[in-house]
Amino acid sequence: MKALTHAMQGRGAISLIALQIIAVAPPLAIVLVERGQPALVQFGAALLIVLAWDYAFAKARRQQFLPQGLTAAAIFVLLTPTDIPIWHMAVTLSLATVIGEHVFGGRGFGFLSPATVALALALLSLPNLELREPSTLATLACLPGLALLLLTGLCSLSVLVAFATTLGAIHSLATPTDLAQLALVALPAFVFLIADPTASAVTLGGRVLYGAVAGALVWVFGGIATEPVTINPIIFAALTASLFAPLFDHVAISLQIRAGRLRHG
Amino acid sequence: MTATDIAASNTIAAALLGADYPNLRIRPEVQEGDSVAPGQILFRNAKHPEIAFAAPIYGRVTSIRLAARRMLSAVTLAPGDAGAAAPDNRIGPDQSIRDYLLARGMWPAFVSRPFGGPPHPDAKAAAIVVSAVPSSRVAPDPRDVLRGRGDTFDRGLDAISELTDGSVHLCLADKSGIDAPALPRLQVHRRSGHQWSSPAAQVVRIAPASPGRATWTIGYQDVIAIGHLLETGRYDPVRRVALWSDPTRPAPTLNVPLGADLGQLLGQPGPERETWSGAAPSGRVSAFLGRHHLDASLVARIRSAPTKPQPIIPLASLWRALPIRLPAIPLMRSLAVGDAETSARLGCLHLLEDDIAPLTAICTSGTDYARRLRDVLERLRSDLS
């Protein structure tokens, strides 16, 4: 794994995209098989949309074409129902790709996950939309991806522990819901949205804060107290936590500097 | 060829490198083609001529290369016969330790933190940190190096204590089995852990440096060399180092001259591999052994910096790569854009090039953080002076 980390040296966002694609491939493959032709058409359309934007921005900036939107398209298809209108998917994915990624300079330069932005936009613009959780089999297929991302350092263990602990603690206080069901719903959203390294905090303290706040926000947005548990509140929790991630880092750095001053005079 | 043969055979080329002495303008005392002997002064610091730099081998000066703004790039020496006599003069009765070390080329053994490089010739250190911790798991064991040279080491420790009003801190690995001498201002620190081998970690834990309060660091083999100089009047350019070209085999430790040609010792680098001075991933790519390095290896070639800016993907391994606990990724971002003020706030003054080199080996952006750190440190130094 150390060799894999060193292989990422100097390769920019391509290493991130490649590892995220490897992580999302097993659950996506299961979902495509389970949902059949409509899901294949949806995935094909999503790919077309995001890659068109990637190509357009690469041309405009005279940069090498990089399929940055692959992960956003895959995660979008994993978590949305197949009956979402194509035009709607085109608008949300386009806005998310441009606002969440390309205006900042591309993958890795921004502070939002384009997949989270796309799903949040879809939920905001279609109030009756219910995202579709993957089947239990597809959810469990996220575990190898989680392991890969943890081992390569693309997913932070601090975020995972803080998120799971907060979610578990709040669940024990307030809940009619089944903890196992909550974990199954939260797993794909955590692996592919909350744990996105470019959208989360980057300091150790900031990551703990980020994970804890993301867990608490799931409760704030109604993801724990309601039956049945849905993925919708987790999307908003991921987006809100991402927006505040730079603030969490600022707090963590300020505390660290202050502690250093107290220690060294 | 045995360990002793490498240094004694006088067949290894050597060099004094600008990379070890940031922004050093020199005043040469020899010319290309001149014959030199170990301890003979090759050049002086043009701004502070008291600081002399000595030749590590018998041989001939093959090139004196200067970089932009006449900064030292490298002075290279080819091995030759022991024709010229090596300087042999003991410390005078009225000569201070400081003047003696400056004149005999031992002053560059010290590194002043913050900012790096040899200390100002008139400066007094707030504290001196002597590192006798193996720099890597394959580095020479200080206990082996010190065997039979304990008195010389103690003499060196006693001498350098005159260069500070504070304490001399001897850093040892836990259970190193090294007995420290009973000197009035000597403090001994024993710890375990990988990060303890880094001078940056030792300084931050023991005597944190700041622009108004410099801490000097020196390696235990340099302290032995100082003791040897005081005892015999002879300059000791030999260091025991670990050299490994095959990671599957134990690294041999050899006695080699300072600045030894790594191509001769490790085999010439090819398109896939290059010679690395220092305990990788600390250290740097170099054809010659760095002044303060006790490890060298053949490593896979690091990808050259991409022409267009690449993003810094915040991998968890990045913040574990630094020897001290600093917010690595914010620091990398501020260094990448040359923001000196933010870099200082985030702790860049605790670091030197070797400390930050592991980030270059991991980061997806391909940025050379050692070079960026040097730029920022020089800017901060000029702002403060």
Image (tube, coloured by chain):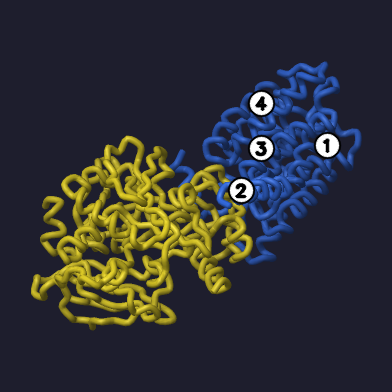
Rounded to the nearest whole Å, what is the CA distance between mark 1 and mark 2? 56 Å
Rendered shade, chain A:
blue
Q: Element at badge 1?
A: loop
Q: Is residue A122 above or below residue B91?
A: above
In contact (CB < 8 Å): disc 1 and disc 2: no
Residue corresponding to mark 3: A208
Q: Is residue B335 above or below residue A147?
A: below
Please rate how many residues cluster around mark 4, counting C-alpha atoms within 10 Å: few if below 14, some from 14 to 19, many from 20. Answer: many
Please rate how many residues cluster around mark 1, counting C-alpha atoms within 10 Å: few if below 14, some from 14 to 19, many from 20. Answer: some
Q: Position of residue B5 (x, y in %)?
A: 11, 55
Q: Is residue A227 above or below residue B227?
A: above
Residue corresponding to mark 2: A262
**Left or right: A111 with respect to B64?**
right
Discs 4 and 1 carry the same chain letter? yes
In contact (CB < 8 Å): disc 4 and disc 1: no
Residue type, numbered disc 1? Ile
Q: Chain of mark 4?
A: A
Disc number for residue A138: 4
Query: First in sequence: mark 3 or mark 4?
Result: 4
Residue corresponding to mark 1: A84
The mark lying in front, picked from 4 and 1, is: 4
Discs 3 and 4 carry the same chain letter? yes
**Left or right: A205 with respect to B317?**
right
Which residue is found at the position 60% from the left and 41% from the top? A20
Residue type, numbered disc 2? Leu
Query: First in sequence: mark 3 or mark 1?
Result: 1
Discs 3 and 1 carry the same chain letter? yes
Q: Position of residue B55 (x, y in %)?
A: 22, 71
The mark lying in front, picked from 2 and 4, is: 2
Q: Chain of mark 2?
A: A
| Residue A33 visible at all | yes
